[in-house]
Image (cartoon, grey):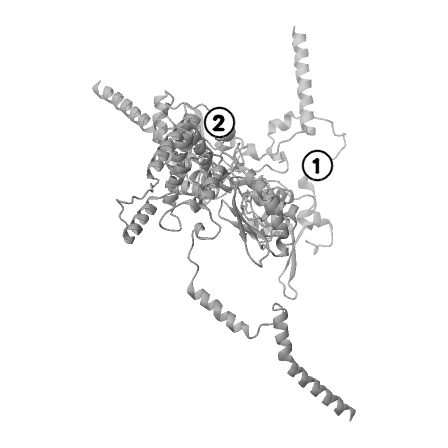
Amino acid sequence: MANNRVLQWAVMARTWWIYDANLQCPFRSSERIITYLKGKHKPIYHPFADIGDHVVVFNTRHVAMRGNFWRTFKHFNHTRYAGGFSQASAWRVHEMDPTRIMEKACYQRLSGLPMKKTLMARLHLYPDEEIPQEILENVSGQIRQVQVVPKKLEDYTEEEIQNFPRLFEWPENYDVESYQRENQQEPDQHTTKKWRLD
Amino acid sequence: MAASLVRTCVLTTRRTLQFLRPISFALQESHDSKRSYHRRQKGFLREMYKKRIDIGPDKPRRRSEWINWNYDCEIFSFGQRLGENFDEGSLRQAFVHRSYVEQEKEKRAELGIDLESVPLELDDNSDLANSGDKLMKDYLKVYLRNIYPYMFEECISSVCDHLMMDETLSHIASHLGCEDLILCQDFPVQPSVLSVTFKAVVGALEQAQGKERAEAFVRDFVLPQLIGKDLNEMWPLHNPMGLLVALLSLTGRGQPEPRLLWKSGSNTMMSLYWVGIYSNKQLISKAPGETVLIAEEMAAREAVKKVMRTEDNRPPLVLGTVAERLELDRDRVNASAEDIVRRHYEQSSGQSDSITSS
Amino acid sequence: MSNNAIPRDFVKNVLQNGVGRYVCQLKRITFRFCKSHGGSRHMRDFIENNLLEFTQKNPGVVCYLQPRRHRPPSVVAEFLNGRREVMLLSGKEVPEICKWVEHMRTRSGVQIVNMIQNNHTETPSTQGIWHPFMFRDSEMAATEFPSKKFSQIQVTGKTATDLVLEEQLKVSSSESSDSHIEGK
């Protein structure tokens, strides 16, 4: 009696997972996160059953988008009143609320589900590495990242840079300095269409 | 002119139809009463229905009160159905309850018949029930001791008590057809009466066919009631950890150390903890729980289950044709949990005395 | 089936019949017929020719004959679980009556409804039912989350940078071995 109760509790338990969104694609991460929210990682999965888990996502501020997406990917909104349509680029949304991109990515992937709001309530998003202690104590597992986090030039030590093998030599009269970032103009500066700031 | 003619024709036909209707209605009634709408009978039927409801439900009647009943045939078939050759006299006696005998005596006294001159040749089933009860208890304990050689005596007697409960035995008896055959005072038959009758049937079988056949009967009807039941839940063990400490110390193994294995959602309502019990750094059992204390207690129970070899994945009971070849050691006595705990405390108190003295 | 209007139930066994010994669940059968009406003629034939065989084969079943004037033939079966089933046999010939009697004899007495599953077990699993921590690496129990080890994607291939660095190592190791030989 008590034994069965306790065993059933163990099978149906709701576990907590944590995910580091640092330099990860929000859309590909959301694919994986949604799997855990729905409970599809469990062999006891059923679409009617509510056996999804909690997922804590941190470093959403440092999420990475491919190509032009920061500029071209738009979030739309309509207040259902006349003239109530508005849109904003991903970078604007991200500036306003650093967790919104990740939240929207997960929400839009949950299309057609009646339990959408319940599942979104189990998704906890934090922009940086500061997570409340009571949430962190609940966590019992980590979801693997979707992309390799590349090592930036700043992360290499001077020694490593010096010791890295030189694969080729620049020609003698090659102007290397013109390609340095400091000497380059801002993307929009060379155009006359200054109003086109999307 | 033509229109008025038509109108008068219509009027006459309508009147004639009205005139015809009561007759046609009566004709319909006598022909086929299911098709017409019983306009007049409706109120009568409704009144009759209300009266029936007011009177109340029928008094429950014994099966013997119906016309198709022959007690001799029923008694004979009862034995044949179970595949046993009963002695008819003792079987009939097995179905006579004490209350029936007393009722008969009262009736005779009312009628003015002197019981000493014309003695009532009815014996009730209490003797047979006592002998049947004894045989059942002995056999159940012998069987359980042999099938579960590591089970503690207290657990065995708890399981045996559970099987001998009025509920269980009355359930078995009613599903063997005893209810119709019992002669007792009140109806419907009480579970206590049914359980006494079942024991008496076992006693009657022992008298007729011998101990072995009676034991086979018990094995075939009483023991299958354990299927699907949790044996460990039948034994009210209040301190599993204490028993485990005593067991491990007496067998010379390390003291039990409970350790947290897994936890999830500690600050939520749906918290889950897995606690494992280690002895000499070896895991002996683990169990989940809503809180750490519950999980620890369940882990200790799981360890005791492992010692008794009564885990959930234990092999099934030996029943049916396979059990006919079972050889049971009737003198076997299993270990007693109370004994173990007492010995452990004597040992530990002895040690502490030696420490204080030194 | 998800329709609640159509009755359905799991498979049931009365008193674990068959586990110990098999007991025929039919305890008594009553043959009701009319002695003169034409509708009961098959029933009368059955009683004359086939009933004795049935009673001899099944001594555990009590058979009653109940003649009822002007009433159609039927059979009432009473089972050990207390249920009572009536079968109307008017218009049914002797072979069919035999089959229905045989049907009553071999029944468990449980009401016939749609089966949800045609099997039942008390022990569905011997290895234990899955739980979230069954196959989890026990190292995860001791880690403090978030942990870099369990977060990093597991890379299977080699990047260009890795290959270049490997080449450098090879070249430097061969140089050192050459210098070693030279020194020697």
Q: Position of residue B170 (x, y in %)?
A: 41, 43
SS at mark 2?
helix
At 67% from the left and 23% from the top, the residue drawn is C166
Chain letter of disc 2? Answer: B
| Most foreground residue, A185 or C154 | C154
Q: Position of residue B273 (x, y in %)?
A: 45, 37
Q: CA distance from mark 1 to mark 2?
A: 98 Å
Q: Is residue B110 left or right of residue B334?
A: left
Q: Which residue is at the far right?
A: B2
| Amino acid under disc 1 | Glu
Residues marked 1 and 2 touching at CB (< 8 Å): no
Chain letter of disc 1? Answer: A
| Res. B324 mark | 2
Nearest to the eye among marks 1 and 2: give it. 2
Q: Quadrant of residue B94?
A: top left
| Res. A46 mark | none
Q: Which residue is at the far left?
A: B357
| Res. A177 mark | 1
Establish whether labels 1 and 2 are both on one chain: no
| Most foreground residue, A15 or B2 | B2
Category of crowding for the residue at label 1, using alpha-carbon neighbours closer than 10 angstroms: few (below 14), some (14–19), many (at least 20):
few
Q: Which residue is at the far front?
A: B117
Q: Quadrant of residue C148?
A: top right
Q: Is residue B221 left or right of residue C97?
A: left
SS at mark 1?
helix
